[in-house]
Image (tube, coloured by chain):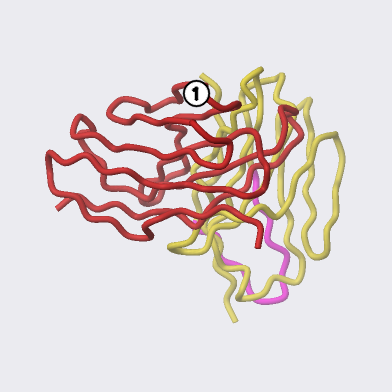
Chain colours: A yellow, B red
Amino acid sequence: QKEVEQNSGPLSVPEGAIASLNCTYSDRVSQSFFWYRQYSGKSPELIMSIYSNGDKEDGRFTAQLNKASQYVSLLIRDSQPSDSATYLCAVISGSARQLTFGSGTQLTVLP
Amino acid sequence: DGGITQSPKYLFRKEGQNVTLSCEQNLNHDAMYWYRQDPGQGLRLIYYSQIVNDFQKGDIAEGYSVSREKKESFPLTVTSAQKNPTAFYLCASRWGDSGYNEQFFGPGTRLTVL
């Protein structure tokens, strides 16, 4: 059973702070890792993808991947109230290229 | 505009009825997926299709059926055999067969059983 685990939260941070979201996965051969943002009542929106160990930065977002520890994280710098959403970690593994999702972390950025 | 469309946005079903959810994409994506999301939970895979006229069961296929007669279309039928169909249904698509290709989602259909 391939699993993706996230802290369910909720996570609250003040505006301007760094929000740190964490995800672990069980399948060692997983090859692709994604972070989706989902606003209440809306569909998930892809915000970051990462495929190799290390950091990947895109604006205020940084994804970090450590395959040895089977750990992927998302940092949001200078958090804004508009970042308040549920963040879903997703992992691709296996020949079918299926995405396995974590249950999501609900983030609230307090003004 | 390129994208993935789902219809209807809201759907109400009486118990014992079959209903069909539409998913269309004009992104020329090869693979298409159906997920179900229950409140406070992640997405669970119902069915997926990597090529026309072929599809595979996901983790929770019981009570659902699909077809893939055209590359652009992947409709999902929720049958009366699905015991608890009230949920948010999301269609997604992806280009190519590489594990490096991102999946993109349609806006979703919210199904409620009356």
Which image quarter: residue A37? bottom right
* Place of residue A107 in the rendered image (x, y in percent of width and height, measured from the top left): 56, 62
Query: Could you say where residue A42 lies in the image, as x and y percent from the top left?
Result: 48, 61
In percent of width and height, residue A108 lies at 55, 67
- Left or right, B109 with respect to B101, comes to left
Compared to residue A102, the image places residue B113 above or below, namely below
Residue B94, image x and y in percent? 65, 39
Residue B16 lies left or right of residue B104; in this view the side is: left
Position of residue B34 in the picture relative to residue B29 (left or right)? left
Residue found at the far bottom of this picture: A111
Q: Residue at x 55, y 43 (%)?
A: B92
Q: Which residue is mark 1?
A: B55
Q: Classify 10 Å Cα crowding around label 1: few (below 14), some (14-19), many (20 and above).
A: some
Q: Quadrant of residue B51?
A: top right
Magenta span covers which residues? A10-22
In the image, residue B36 sits, relative to residue A15, either above or below, namely above
Tell me, yes or no, whether the highlighted magenta stretch contains residue B30. Answer: no
Q: Main secondary structure of the magenta part?
A: strand
Residue depicted at x 51% and y 24%: B53
